[in-house]
Amino acid sequence: MRIKRFDLPLRTSTAKVRAVAASADTEYTLIYTRDTRLDWVWLGLERLLQIADDTGAAMIYADHFNGSEPAPVIDYQKGSLRDDFDFGGVQVYRTSALKQAVDAMDEEYEFAAMYDLRLRVSELGQLVHVNELLYYETETDTRDSGEKLFDYVDPRNRGVQLEMERACTAYLKRMGGWLAPEFKEVDLGEGDFPVEASVVIPCKNRARTVGDAIRSALAQKTGFAYNVIVVDDNSTDGTVEVIRSYADDPKLIYIAQDKTYHAIGGNWNAALHHPQCGRFALQLDSDDVYSDDNTVQRFVDAFREQDCAMVVGTYRITDFEMRELPPGVIDHREWTPDNGRNNALRVNGLGAPRGFWTPLLRELNFPTTKYGEDYAVGLRVCREYRIGRIYEVMYNCRRWGGNSDTQLDLESVNRNNLYKDRIRTWELEARIRMNRK
């Protein structure tokens, strides 16, 4: 017998993982992490082991079926640090690598042991993805993608997440990618700007919602001058007409993009480099509305009080009529002054709404993408600069059928996750290089 199977949930203790390693006495060890039935495609397991032999994989996993529907997964890479990375239910370890990793475990976890295990195994060899449908299982989490997205900040999971952070932090230290809480200082008085702050609203085909966002931004009460920059990316649904209906307000700046490719990141760059952009550029998505008329003032106060290059606020998940939806308030309490920028490599987002110190963002710029552009910029900023936090609700994030992440198909979820893993890979490499210098 070349392989022995053990059943363990993804959230399990170090003691149970140690027990598996102690009982593992075959060349390969299969850990099944689902509580549902596992059935193999004919010769599927044999195929998995054949590729494990050929590649020398430390761990191997495969595409599969969820019931009768194909459920492909994505390639593992250096930046695949999310603790909820989806391997499918089947994880096959080379037993020698499994035992070596377990022998090195120096912390006891109640929930994070499987996460700790695969991080350690990834240091010993390849985690190989076989993009062939090799087995059948049943996924029991049938929630929409938009609800799953916030599991890592759900207060009910706080104890679990603290353990995951410890495991990730230890990994970053072993890899040379951990950053001490030391930051470059910023001169917030640098440069001349026409206004102190600009609310930036990028949009495309948001006729249903952009008027609410614009009204919310124009209604702000501040002790300084500000404006609202709306960047339209070639809308065809009446969005432009909605924007122009507010043209009489002198605070409104309207940018109409040309026909080349921009995406959300490119629209942000157009606002940041516009001559009317303020000292601080503040986010408001075209789907959403500020929670009150003091949000812009709170943003600028936070920049000044916390002496930082970026500020991240708190928001509430609601439906289109502003009724609160689970998990409710998203405050990203996992962001701490001493370890937030390290933990940022583990989670899939940094929170919202976001505000940026314009001089720095004009140097860094947003990537020209329509997903993950804000996460990429946030990681890059916190590599060197302090990010401030506001733990009061600053806007309502409305979930509806037109949102980008409400009800995504599996292909879209995989594409988004693959890109964010690449962002993390690039950032981790940059941090390792910076530490070496």
Image: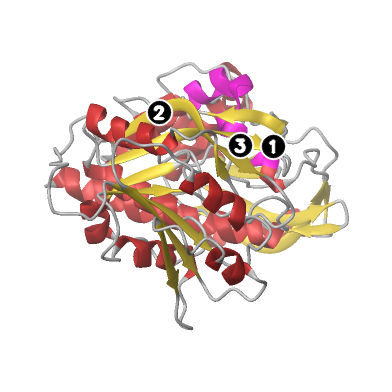
Q: Residue at x 57, y 64 (%)?
A: 245
**Tag 1 or tag 2, which sits nearer the N-term?**
1
**Residue placed under numbered mark 2 in the picture:** 390
**Residue placed under numbered mark 3 in the picture:** 150
**Residue placed under numbered mark 1 in the picture:** 322
Does 150 appear in magenta?
Answer: yes
**Tag 2 or tag 3, which sits nearer the N-term?**
3
Expressed as whole percent of the image width and height from the top left, the position of residue 159 reads 55, 17
- Amino acid at pointer 1: Met
Expressed as whole percent of the image width and height from the top left, the position of residue 294 reads 44, 32
Q: Which residues are magenta?
A: 147-164
Q: Is residue 146 visible?
A: yes
- Amino acid at pointer 3: Phe
In the image, residue 88 above or below residue 25? below
In-image side of 191 versus 62 (left or right): left
Q: Quadrant of residue 48?
A: bottom right
